[in-house]
Each structure stands twice: as structure tokens, then as C-alpha cells.
Amino acid sequence: MYQPFNIGDRFRIVPPATPASPDKRIDLIMQRGAFGSGEHETTENCLETLETLGDLQGMRVLDLGSGTGILAIAAVKLGAASALCVDIEPQAVATAKINCQLNGLEKPISHFIGTLDDVDQTSFDLILANIYGDILLAVAAPLTKRLAPGGTLLLSGILWEYNFDIRQRYEKLGCELLRNRFLEDFSTILLRKKP
């Protein structure tokens, strides 16, 4: 077990069977496991960025490299209509399914073991990808193709040396930079696909 901890202004990460947050924070119930429970700086920054996006009501979300499913869970708790979690690791997908059950979100969040190439759905309003920079470069074209015009793209897990190349690549594919944040070792890039 771990102690509950706050992230940003709205979220609290809690282990299973923790009483509801007394201060109206959004509880993200996470089973601790090999894929962490939200402590990594990139996960923390993604959650802090998600809460600044405003109303996610009705949005279709893709969480690529979903790990524990924490970002998809947070997006649905912020109002997104549905989320698809995609990861190549079967154990990560199993963990994400458990975490969705713990949060009562089995229906709006679906899970898939595989890569972006295996995803049939072609239009998402919000894409979350907290994965390595070299992978973000490799999937840039198919990823932006699956983003609806005007949609938002949150990329993280990017070591500093990949930041410029990734920004340049996604901008060439029709995205505009909204925010670029450098963390201790990694960086997070927020983009919007031009209508």
C-alpha cells in the first residue's frame, strides 16, 4: 500500500479502499504495480496539463502506451465520453483493466493489446501519448491522422534531446504548439491540430 498523494489542483492518487477525498478532489484509485501509480514526473505533468484543458465533455480519447490507464481514467473523470487504452504489454493492459474497475469505469474505457497500427478507430478528440521520444517520432504521421481537426495532442515521456525534433515533426503535420514544458529529465508538449 502507499499513502494518498495530490497531483495538481484537482487530482488525488489513492490506493483501493481509501475513503473519498474530503476536499472535493478527483480520486484516481490506482493499484500499485510494475507500472507505477502516478509518481513519475511525466505522468504527474500529464495530469496537471489535463486539468487545464477545460471541459472534456463528450470527447473521444486515445491513450497510447497507456500503462496503468491513469491518464484515460483522469480524462473520463474530467468528462470525456470514452477512452481507448492501447499498450503493447499484456501486463500493462491487465493492470489498466483492474484500475478501471476500481474506478467504476469499465464501460467508457476499452483496452487493446497492440500498436497504433492495430487501432481501427480513426478519429479522436484528445490523444494522450506518454511514451519514448523515438516512438513519438516514428508514429507522428499515423497519430496526427487519427486526431480530429481541432483536436488536442498531449505528448510526454520526451527526453530533452528529442524535444525540438518532435515539435518540428508534429508542426509539419499540421499541429500548432500550445505549451512546451521541460521537467527534470523529460519534457511535455501540448499541441492542437489545425482545423
Image: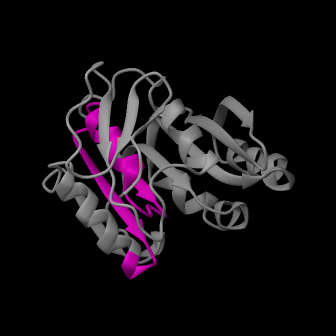
Q: Position of residue 155 (x, y in %)?
A: 60, 47
Residue 109 horizontal side relative to residue 172, left or right: left
Q: Could you say where residue 12 lies in the image, as x and y percent from the top left?
A: 38, 35
Considering every residue shown, the one lying at the far bottom of the view is: 90
Q: Nearer the viewer, residue 190 or 122?
A: 190
Would residue 106 appear left or right of 90 to someone viewing this image? left
User: Where is 182 relative to 96, above or below?
Assistant: above
Q: Is residue 66 magenta?
A: yes
Task: From the viewer's side, name the closer residue of 78 and 33.
Answer: 33
State the residue at coordinates (20%, 37%). Answer: 19
The answer to whether any part of residue 195 appears in the image is no
Where is residue 179 drawn, in percent x and y?
A: 67, 29
Q: How is colour applied across the structure in the image? A: one colour
In percent of the image, x 31 and y 50: which residue is there?
A: 15
Determine whether, in the image, residue 40 is placed left or right of residue 117. right
> Which image quarter: residue 56?
top left
Quarter the N terminus occupies: bottom left
User: Magenta stretch?
Assistant: 62-91
| Residue 94 visible in rendering | yes
User: Residue at (48%, 66%) from the top-left corner?
Assistant: 35
Q: How many numbered discs sit on the rendered protein?
A: 0
**Is 79 covered by the magenta stretch?**
yes
Identify whether 144 is placed above or below 55: below
Q: Nearer the viewer, residue 159 or 134?
A: 159
The answer to whether residue 80 is left or right of residue 67 is left
Residue 159 pos. (x, y %): 78, 55
